[in-house]
Image (cartoon, rainbow, N blue to C red):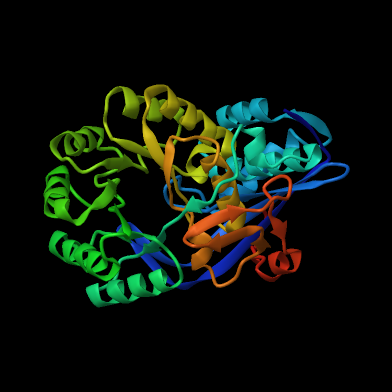
Amino acid sequence: MEIEVEDVESFPIGIDRDEVFRISTGSSLTAENVLVRIKSKTEDGWGNSSANSVTDESVESILKAVKVMSSNMKDERIDVEKNWQDMREKLPDDPAALAGVDIALYDLAGKLSGKRVYEIINGVNEGILTDRTIGLMTESETREHAREFMRRGFKAIKIKIGMGLMEDIRRIKAVREEGGPDLDIWVDANQAFTPEESITLCQRIADLNVKFVEQPVDVDDIAGLKKVTEETDMPIMADETVKGPKMAEKICTEEIADMINIKLAKCGGITGGRKIVDVMERYGVDGMVGCMGETSVSIGAGAHLFNSTSKLKFADLDSHFMLSDNIASGLDFECGKLWISDDPGLGMRIHEDKVKKYLMDLEGEL
């Protein structure tokens, strides 16, 4: 898949969330992203890079990395797969920056060919059940948020934990009480516990019909993750531990976790996500498409990836719901599911007036 590229532009934006979002590794009020626009003679493609602590990338580092990448792309004919491989080797510590470029190239390729991105990667357009995430908060606040999210039509809720085993167990029980037997409940520890604590947690919530527990132990504790997987019947999902296909293969071959969470910002975009999907399909391992603090541009890209394989069983594509404003349209939410637009490319329509509104005023040379 080759594309004639004329120019590459970057737009650092900061959009406040509706409330402070807390997880076990920190909290934030403002979601910081870099939008990437790649121009051809006739069309523009848009992508989204997310500043985040998992890959340790900031808005400033993303802008610098995209500038390096764009120097090899302007006025050139770009092979998307080769460009991804070259940039991954040249800038191995900048996967979120690469994600923005890669997503924009797919969007552009779709628009130029008149195809939707999921068609380019051999997928279909189906409604995607997505969750709504509850951050770290008290039991009563957890109940209130669960009720509100269900009122809005969400049929799956992910609960962030890390407030202490007993408090977390009470919060999970509270959501089950509020949601009844039909609500999907997912649990995400964000590395909060030791392997022993994680096993205790899984045992204590075994009767609550929790679909999985995500990343219960430290990102580098591979042995601990495997221990939890082996010593509990609860499905265990690896998230922060998996940033690319090499670790995905290790997870699968050594049975370190039961499932894998793909986040485009961790693995370098749609191309990187597809490489992890290839591993999952080869070993018969299921997983999820997740998100960080991205806008709906990246959420749309994740939705296209989700619809390209049957091995992705879960979608945590809700970060745009947490933002106080939406800089793009093209994703509909109905009956608990996300629906992709029929427009070519990602199907997203960028509101450039809002992009200008939320531009960050960065001082100094980048």
Q: Is residue 366 visible?
A: no
In percent of the image, x 57 and y 48: which residue is there?
Answer: 61
The residue positioned 64% from the left and 63% from the top of the image is 362
Q: Which quadrant of the figure has residue 217?
A: top left
Q: Residue 164 versus residue 172: which sits nearer the camera? A: 172
Q: Residue at x 66, y 58 (%)?
A: 330
Q: Residue furthest right?
A: 41
Q: Judge left or right: residue 35 versus residue 190.
A: right
Above or below, 146 relative to 112: below
Image quarter in which the N terminus is found: top right
Please indicate whether residue 27 sits to the left or right of residue 277 in the image: left
Q: Is residue 54 visible?
A: yes
Residue found 62% across the figure and 33% down from its top: 121
**In this picture, residue 35 sits left or right of residue 112:** left
Q: Which of 320 and 308 lies nearest the eye of the viewer?
A: 308
Q: Is residue 254 above or below residue 33?
A: above
Q: Position of residue 281 (x, y in %)?
A: 44, 27
Q: Report x, y in % for residue 38.
A: 75, 45
Numbered circles on residues, count: 0
Q: Quadrant of residue 101?
A: top right
From the viewer's perspective, is residue 121 above or below residue 26?
Answer: above
Q: Residue 204: percent from the left, percent from the top?
A: 12, 54
